[in-house]
Image: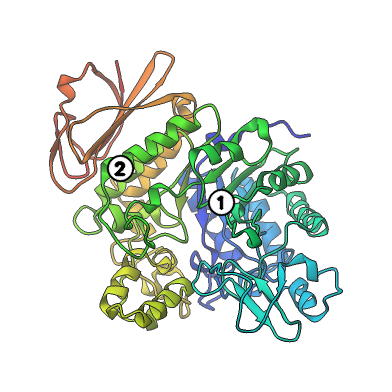
Amino acid sequence: MEEKTNWWKKATIYQIYPRSFQDSNGDGIGDLPGIIQRLDYLALLGIDAIWLSPVYPSPNEDNGYDISDYEAIGEEYGTMEDMDRLILEAKKRNIKIIMDLVVNHTSSMHPWFQAAKQDVNSKYHDFYVWRKGHAQEPPNALTSNFGGSAWTFVPELNKYYFHLHAKEQPDLNWENPTLRKEIYRMMNYWIQKGIGGFRLDVIDLIGKEPDALITKNGPKLHTFLQEMNQHTFGPYDLVTVGETWGATPEIAQLYSDVQRKELSMVFQFEHINLDKQPGKRKWDLKKLDPQELHQVFAKWQIELANKGWNSLFWNNHDLPRIISRWGNDREYRVVSGKMLAIYLFFLQGTPYVYQGEEIGMINYPIHSIDEVDDIESRRMYAQRLKEGYAKEDIIASINAKGRDNARHPMQWDASKQAGFTTGTPWLAVGDASEINVEAALKDSNSLFYTYQKLIKLRKELPILIEGSFQTFPTSHANVLAYTRSYGNTEILVVVNFSSQEATFALSQTPYTIKEVYIHNYDKEINDTLLPYEAYAVRVK
């Protein structure tokens, strides 16, 4: 058994969406050799691990989250030799590779499902969830996350199969012990290759009980996870993070309490849902209330302290770019990006940086549905048109929340196609005239160097890992403040979450500044906060 160092508590993890990171062969699709080319850049940033979105073979109905072979590499991304080389080259730079794993469902093109459909007596039939039924009457009213029924009829079997996502993503039957053994064997195959851990896609769905209308957080979920831990990553010094849209702090404690031997941490999304209308879908927009955001983060900080571990993130492959969403992607793009980073990085937990976040990439507005690749946005568009929504309102929702915003290619330089490819990119490249890696590295005041510094501070300051958290009152709707305390050290973090000047009467607090860790304006800290001003200081 390996010694558990919990390295991931000090680590910063960088998410790569391989299709959009770096193309090495001019086919317009990012690939593994492209990632290898850019490892020195990531080493310069200072990250400790790469969370690699799926690179397995896939028909790409849902951009690789529909896997047709768990133990191979998709042709467009390269070969297994490339994968082995990536693990090795990353390791030379002290960077670990975290595999993205989807074990709630497979692609309908996976050999298991193909066999399951052809023969009800095949052992693979019971790897999936089937119910008898009539063509016009699904077993129950459960719906898919992408719209429509969660059941699809197979006439030749006179049965329905269950899918919480697209019909091309049939759900696996975790009640079947043979299936579970097969999943664990496959996970161990990757562990033996020397990876640093797993990000487990929609893992809160594996305990589903469709007949009882339970999809998330089913009664056997934690039993399955404890068994998985025991048979796969448990004995190793690996990080595991579960994607859990339905998690509350109480549920997150179950996943990430060390004593329970489940996961290192989960992605919780409570803060991510604060700019949608209550009870509605993410497309039904409302303005963010910064104080509400602060309260949600505070709740998670306090309730998971000593009972679990937080993940800290603003962006991922499913979310719009945070500067466009809650910062200001025009005149305050860089300074608002720095504010968002400073607020997040001084909290307790493991920060995740999504490709391009560190150079301040922004949303990519579209004018027509023809410009959209994402299955979720396209299906919502069709559904809402039928329901009578105005076309321009649907497009506005897609521009605000569509998943493609995060998936447009990484901007490396100001050349045509932004240095991503020499060919035609699979998805259009944004305006890279100002926002690109080359420009960021040349500018000592760029967002890149703020991220680099924050990543370094997390390694140097034990208070950021161990310290307790407390909100600090500001009496201003847009000013958020909190303290971290550990031993005799106390840090005060203050941010102005708006494009207006604000007042925070630092002179009226009991604090004196002893050291400035980071500040996003080149001015003295005083009681007036400029737009999006943010600082973290050691106080006495």
Return the residue found at the far bottom. 156
Q: Along the polypeptide, which appears first: circle 2 or circle 1?
A: 1
Q: Where is residue 101 in the image (x, y as percent from the top left)?
A: 64, 57
Query: Going 69% across and 68% down the picture, which residue do you hit?
Result: 79
Tell us which disc is closer to us: 2 or 1: 2
Q: Residues within 10 Å of mark 2 (few under 14, many from 20)?
A: few
Q: Name the residue under label 1.
A: 50
Question: In which quadrant of the rendered view does residue 437 lie?
Answer: bottom left
Q: Where is residue 482 in the image (x, y as percent from the top left)?
A: 32, 29
Query: Going 33% across and 57% down the picture, which residue do you hit?
Result: 276
Q: Name the residue under label 2.
A: 292
| The N terminus sits in image quarter | top right
Q: Nearer the viewer, residue 451 or 116?
A: 116
Tags 2 and 1 in contact by the CB under 8 Å rule? no
Q: Position of residue 348 (x, y in %)?
A: 45, 33
Three-letter code, disc 1: Ile
Q: Which of 252 and 342 is in front in this view?
A: 252
Per the image, label 1 sits on a secondary structure element best described as strand
What distance separates the C-alpha of mark 2 from that of mark 1?
31 Å
Three-letter code, disc 2: Glu
Residue 162 higher or lower than 275, as above or below: below
Q: Position of residue 110 (x, y in %)?
A: 72, 73
Question: In which quadrant of the rendered view does residue 135 lie?
Answer: bottom right
